[in-house]
Image (tube, helix red, strand yellow):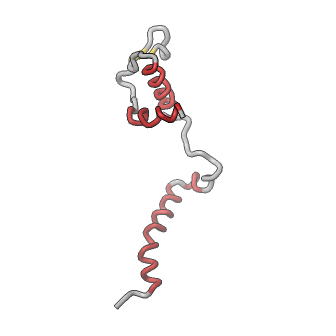
Amino acid sequence: MTAPPLAKWLRYVWQPTAYLLLAVVMTWPLAIELGTKFPSDTGSDMLVHEWTLHWLKQALLNLQNPFFTHLIDYPSGVSLTSHNIAWVNFGMWLPFTYA
């Protein structure tokens, strides 16, 4: 015996609808401003990663050590060996800087 057409439709639609509702609830302030705002947090690591990507590009193009910079704590400089460098993100970002 086959299920009625409405039951088949509900079987395939309820899960995506539940996940969409959950996503709206979890991101509620963003959900109502999605077309007018860009989701970001300028007070956290976003600017650090932007600086890191810029520094890596400059260091590698000028054949400098990417793990040491004089731009922080000038004139003595600082080691970046324990700095969080996102090499995969850098590899994906670099081609777009020349576009």
Q: Vertical placement of 31 versus 73: above or below?
A: below
Asked whether, in this view, residue 90 is left or right of residue 31, the answer is left
Q: Quadrant of the N terminus?
A: bottom left
| Residue that appears at 52% across and 31% down | 98
| Residue that appears at 38% across and 36% down | 88
| Residue that appears at 38% across and 20% down | 67
Q: Position of residue 22 (x, y in %)?
A: 48, 61
| Residue that appears at 47% across and 29% down | 53
Q: Vertical placement of 18 versus 94: above or below?
A: below
Tell me the quarter of the picture where residue 31 sits: bottom right
Q: Vertical placement of 76 versus 81: above or below?
A: above
Asked whether, in this view, residue 8 is left or right of residue 98, the answer is left
Q: Quadrant of the C terminus?
A: top right
Check the image and name the residue furthest to the right. 36
Q: Nearer the viewer, residue 1 or 23?
A: 1
Label total for image = 0
Q: Vertical placement of 7 versus 84: above or below?
A: below
Q: Position of residue 19 (x, y in %)?
A: 46, 63
